[in-house]
Amino acid sequence: MTNAIDSTSFIQLAANDWVPNNPQLPVILYRQVFTPDKSAVSTAQQLFEKNGWPAQWVNGVYPYHHYHSNAHEVLAFAGGEALLMLGGPDGQQVMVRAGDVVLLPAGTGHCNIRSSEDFTVVGAYPPEQQFDLCRGAPTREMLEAIANAPFPHSDPVFGEDGPLIERWVNI
C-alpha cells in the first residue's frame, strides 16, 4: 500500500436537484491505495475485510444517478478508469483509476459518466448495513435514514485510524 493518507481528499456536497447528498459527512477519496495488478480484486476485498467492511460485490458503477439512503458505501477501483459524477446532476466530476478508493456517505449521489472496458469495482458496506437503491427525491423517512445511518467503527482503508475516523468523528 502506498501512503494513501497523504493523497486523500475530501469533497463536501450540498443537496443537488433531487439528490440529497450528505449534509454532514464529506466524500473521502483515497488515491493509489493499492497496486493495480491481476490480484487487485482480491487485494481490495482483503483490505475491506481486514478493516471491518465486508466486501459484497464486484461489478461497476451504474450509468445513472442514484444514492443509498440507509448505508455508507466504499468503492475500490480494481481495474481500468472512469469519470464519475458525484453529487447528482451537475455535481462534481471525479476521475478514478485502478488503485483508488472512494467512500460515499449515505445519501451521496453517484453515476458512471464513462469508463474503460476493464473498469472493475469492489463494493462494501459497514457490517449490518443493507443498501437501498434510490433514483428519486428522498422522502422524509429517507432523509432521516441518511442522517441516522450508523457510524462505521473503522476506516475501510486504514482501520482504527485514518481519514474517516479523523474527519467523520469530529463533525
Image: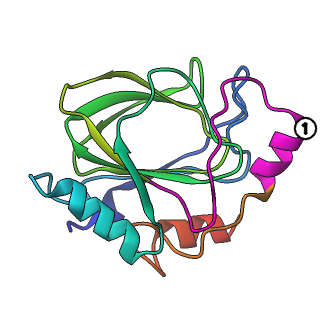
Say which residue appears at 23% left-offset and 54% top-offset: 41
Say which residue appears at 53% left-offset and 66% top-offset: 164
Locate residue 125, reporting x and y percent. 53, 58
Locate residue 146, reporting x and y percent. 75, 48
Q: Which residue is denoted by mark 1 in the rendering?
A: 140
Locate residue 129, reporting x and y percent. 63, 60
Dominant secondary structure, magenta: loop
Tell me: residue 73, above or below residue 91. below
Q: Amino acid at mark 1?
A: Arg
Q: How is the image coloured?
A: rainbow
Instruction: Report the label total.
Output: 1
Q: Which residue occupies the extreme bottom position in the image?
A: 160
In terms of image quadrants, where is residue 7?
A: bottom left
What's the magenta region?
124-147
Tell me: residue 63, above or below residue 86. above
Say which residue appears at 74% left-offset and 45% top-offset: 23
Was residue 134 drawn as part of the magenta stretch in this picture? yes
Q: Nearer the viewer, residue 145 or 84?
A: 145
Question: For this view, does 86 lie left or right of residue 140?
Answer: left
Q: Nearer the viewer, residue 31 or 105?
A: 105
